Image: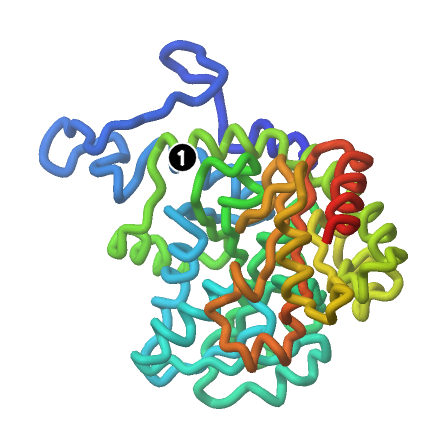
C-alpha cells in the first residue's frame, strides 16, 4: 500500500470484541495470566502494551521497516540507541544536530567514555577520514537542525557498510513522507514523534524503526530495561495524528517553499536556508533524495538601523501574531524561534558560530494555515522590528 493508506490503516484493525474502528486505549498497567507465565502476550505495560504495539507497527510500516519501537520522548529513543555503545567507543555525528542530541552525546555519554566527533557530512569523504578503529556508530540528521544542510544518505551508507558500522538517521524533519532512510542504506531511523508524526503539539514521544532482527532484540531489551516508554493514551494520540501526516506534510512543504522564495527576495533578510531553493548548497542532493522539501525554513535577519542584529531578531520574534514564538516544530500551527537563545543554547557559542547559528538566525516551522496569512504576519513583524 502507498504511504497515504498506511498512515490511516497500518497496524490498526477493528476491535474484535466490539467492532470499534479505532483501536481501544488499553490503560491497564498489568495483565491477568491463566497461570504462572501463561499469558496472552502481555504481562506488564512497561514490557508491552496493545496500544503501544499498534503504534509501533504503524511507524514500522511508514518507514518500510520490519520493526518499530516507541518511546516517551525523542531523547528517550536517542538514549536507548546510544546504550548499545560501551566505554571506549567512538561516534561520528553530523556537525549540525538538535541541541538535545549534542548535549546527550557530550555531557551525558562522553563522561562515561563514549567519545564523539562532529563532522560536516556535506562532503561524504569527510566521514571516511573521521572513522577510527573505535568508531561504532554514525549519527546524522538530514535536513539538519537548524541550518537545513542535506546529507547524501546513500553515499554515507556505502561508507558505513564498508566499515560494518551502523548508520542512524534522525528523520524527524523529513518524515517518511519525504524520505525513507532505510531504503537508502541506513540501519536505524529515529524520530522525535513530538514533531510531525504526532503533528498537534500535544504529545512528547520518540520512535525507532529498523530491519535488523538482532539489533531490534537488543533495543527492545533496552526499551524495557531502561523504561522510557510512552503512555497508552499518548500512543493513541500519535496514531490519530499520523492519520493526517501526509496531508499536513504536503501542505506545510508547499507553503514553506513559497515563503522561502519570498524571504530570499526580502530586503530585511540576509540569507535563507531551505533545500528547495536553487541557492541551497545541497539542492541537487535534496531533489534526488527527498520527495518534497519539507516545512522547515531558517533565515538570517539583517541588523537593525543601530547595527544590533540580536535586538532586531528579538523584536521581530516578539511582533509575530499568527506564528507562535516557541520551541518545537511540526505541528499544525506555525512556530518560530531563535536557535542560539532557545533550541541550541546547549551548544557552545564557538561551535554555534562555526555552524552559523548566530544572533541573526531564525528558525521557522511552517504549519497548515493559509500561506498568505503567514506571509502577511512575517511582513508586519519585519516592518515593526
Q: Quadrant of the N terminus?
A: top right
Q: Furthest residue to the front?
A: 306
Q: Furthest residue to the top?
A: 18
Colouring method of the image: rainbow
Q: Nearer the viewer, residue 329 or 232?
A: 329
For mark 1, does the 10 Å Cα neighbourhood hold few (<14), some (14 to 19), or many (20 or more) residues?
Answer: many
Residue 164 visible in the picture: no
The residue lying at 69 percent from left, 40 percent from top is 249
Q: Is residue 8 above or below residue 176?
A: above
Q: Is residue 35 above or below residue 140?
A: above
Q: Nearer the viewer, residue 325 or 219?
A: 325
Q: Is residue 160 above or below residue 326?
A: below
Q: Point out residue 223 in the picture as x, y percentages from the top left corner.
A: 32, 53
Count the labels in the image: 1
Q: To which residue does mark 1 refer?
A: 234
Residue 219 visible in the picture: yes
Query: Of helix, strand and loop, which one carries label 1?
Result: helix
The residue lying at 44 percent from left, 33 percent from top is 54
Relative placement, left or right, of 108 versus 375 is left
Relative placement, left or right, of 348 versus 316 is left
Relative placement, left or right, of 277 versus 101 is right
Q: Point out residue 38 in the picture as x, y percentages from the top left corner.
A: 17, 34
Q: Nearer the viewer, residue 69 or 364?
A: 364
Q: Quadrant of the C terminus?
A: bottom right
The residue lying at 62 percent from left, 78 percent from top is 353
Q: Point out residue 218 in the picture as x, y percentages from the top left corner.
A: 35, 60
The residue lying at 41 percent from left, 63 percent from top is 81
Q: Point out residue 165 in the picture as x, y percentages from the top left corner.
A: 51, 75
Amino acid at each position: 500500500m502507498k504511504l497515504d493508506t498506511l498512515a490511516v490503516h497500518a497496524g490498526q484493525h477493528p476491535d474484535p470484541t466490539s467492532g470499534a474502528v479505532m483501536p481501544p486505549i488499553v490503560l491497564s498497567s498489568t495483565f491477568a495470566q491463566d497461570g504462572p507465565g501463561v499469558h496472552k502476550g502481555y504481562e506488564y505495560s512497561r514490557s508491552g502494551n496493545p496500544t503501544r504495539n499498534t503504534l509501533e507497527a504503524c511507524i514500522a510500516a511508514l518507514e518500510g521497516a520490519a520493526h518499530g519501537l516507541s518511546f516517551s520522548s525523542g531523547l528517550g529513543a536517542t538514549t536507548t540507541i546510544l546504550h548499545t555503545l560501551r566505554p571506549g567507543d567512538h561516534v561520528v555525528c553530523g556537525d549540525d544536530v538538535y541541541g538535545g542530541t549534542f548535549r546527550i552525546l557530550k555531557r551525558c555519554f562522553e563522561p562515561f567514555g563514549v567519545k564523539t566527533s562532529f563532522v560536516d557530512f556535506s562532503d561524504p569523504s569527510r566521514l571516511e577520514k573521521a572513522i577510527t578503529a573505535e568508531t561504532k556508530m554514525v549519527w546524522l540528521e538530514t535536513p539538519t537542525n537548524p541550518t537545513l544542510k542535506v546529507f547524501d544518505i546513500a553515499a554515507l551508507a556505502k561508507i558505513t557498510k564498508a566499515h560494518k558500522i551502523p548508520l542512524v538517521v534522525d528523520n524527524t524533519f523529513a518524515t517518511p513522507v519525504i524520505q525513507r532512510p532505510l531504503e537508502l542504506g541506513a540501519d536505524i531511523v529515529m524520530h522525535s514523534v513530538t514533531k510531525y508524526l504526532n503533528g498537534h503539539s500535544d504529545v512528547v514521544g520518540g520512535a525507532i524503526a529498523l530491519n535488523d532482527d538482532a539489533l531490534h532484540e537488543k533495543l527492545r531489551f533496552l526499551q524495557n530495561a531502561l523504561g522510557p516508554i510512552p503512555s497508552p493514551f499518548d500512543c493513541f494520540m500519535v496514531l490519530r495524528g499520523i492519520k493526517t501526516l501526509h496531508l499536513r506534510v504536503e501542505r506545510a512543504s508547499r507553503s514553506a517553499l513559497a515563503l522561502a522564495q519570498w524571504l530570499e527576495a526580502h530586503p530585511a533578510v540576509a540569507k535563507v536556508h531551505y533545500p528547495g531553493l536553487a541557492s541551497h548548497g545541497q539542492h541537487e542532493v535534496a531533489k534526488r533524495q527527498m520527495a518534497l522539501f519539507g516545512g522547515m525554513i531558517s533565515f538570517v535577519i539583517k541588523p537593525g538601523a543601530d547595527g544590533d542584529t540580536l535586538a532586531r531578531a528579538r523584536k521581530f520574534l516578539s511582533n509575530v501574531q499568527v506564528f507562535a514564538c516557541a520551541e518545537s516544530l511540526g505541528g499544525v500551527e506555525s512556530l518560530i524561534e531563535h536557535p542560539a537563545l532557545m533550541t541550541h543554547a546547549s551548544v557552545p557559542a564557538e561551535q554555534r558560530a562555526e555552524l552559523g547559528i548566530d544572533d541573526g538566525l531564525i528558525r521557522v516551522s511552517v504549519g497548515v494555515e493559509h500561506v498568505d496569512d503567514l506571509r502577511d504576519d512575517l511582513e508586519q513583524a519585519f516592518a515593526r522590528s
